[in-house]
Amino acid sequence: MKFFIDTADIDEIREAYSVGVVDGVTTNPSLIAQTGRPFDAVLHDICEIVDGPISAEAVSERAADLIAEGRDLEAIHRNIVVKLPLTLDGLKACKALTNDDIKTNVTLCFSANQALLAAKAGATYVSPFVGRLDDIGHIGMELISQCVTIFANYPDLHTQVLVASVRNPTHVTEAAMVGAHVATIPFKVIQQLVRHPLTDSGIQKFLSDWTKVPA
């Protein structure tokens, strides 16, 4: 399973990418707004750090505008993946951009039927939001399992399941167990993946014992 980092914070991206476990980046308007910087400037900085898919969101509502915006975003860098909303207009834009060989990430997916529509429209990725489903009493990971199973049933569908709205390490483990292609993970959760109290105590024991080794 590939790991993307879900952030627009350049310092977080640089640190996570340096570890060697990050394959790409996802951003959204909320994350970009948190930086307080122009959209294009943030994207340029990310593209200089990460050699992998970088999702950048088109924020129009009509298909024609989404298509035009998507083409502008793709022109920024070869690694840009255009994020589109899972709406009828978003699907129309997805099909048009896919026909232009522009990679797409259809986002805000909350049902298997939506995911199947995105795949039929040619999306490179579809992003089901597990955390937001959990928030309203659903089991978000059930949707991931459904999407993986459905796509596996039809080899002509090449869309990858990108697990979004990841809130904790358990989401990452479960996504990998059901066969998701990608998980996009906040920096704080990436840090949590590394940590285990037994690792910490083991290091301290080894370091303590090392001081007892004769020079």
Image: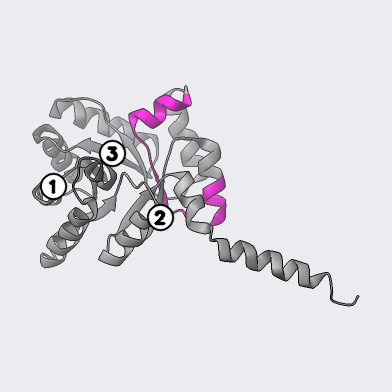
Q: Is residue 215 left or right of residue 42?
A: right
Q: Is residue 31 left or right of residue 68?
A: right
Residue 39 appearing in the image: no
In this rendering, the label closer to the viewer, 2 or 1: 2
Secondary structure under the numbered disc 2 in the rendered image: helix
**Alpha-carbon distance for marks 3 and 2?**
27 Å
Sooner in the amino-acid sequence: mark 3 or mark 2: 3
Q: Which residue is mark 3?
A: 82
Q: Establish if 113 lies above or below 46.
A: below
Kind of residue at badge 3: Val
Q: Quadrant of the C terminus?
A: bottom right
**Alpha-carbon distance for marks 2 and 1?**
23 Å
| Residue 1 screen position, x and y as percent | 35, 62
Q: Which residues are magenta?
A: 15-35
**Alpha-carbon distance for marks 1 and 3?**
21 Å
| Residue 12 screen position, x and y as percent | 52, 41
Q: Is residue 62 left or right of residue 70?
A: left
Residue sitting at the far right:
215
Q: Establish if 186 lies above or below 71.
A: below
Q: Which residue is mark 2?
A: 169
Q: Which residue is mark 1?
A: 111
The crowding category of the residue bearing disc 3, from other C-alpha atoms within 10 Å (few below 14, some 14 to 19, many at least 20), is many
The residue depicted at 15 percent of the width and 35 percent of the height is 90
Secondary structure under the numbered disc 3 in the rendered image: strand
The crowding category of the residue bearing disc 1, from other C-alpha atoms within 10 Å (few below 14, some 14 to 19, many at least 20), is some
| Residue 105 screen position, x and y as percent | 25, 44
Q: Which numbered marker is on residue 194? A: none
* Near-viewer residue (100 or 144): 144
| Residue 182 screen position, x and y as percent | 32, 56
Q: Establish if 41 lies above or below 78.
A: above
The residue depicted at 43 percent of the width and 34 percent of the height is 43
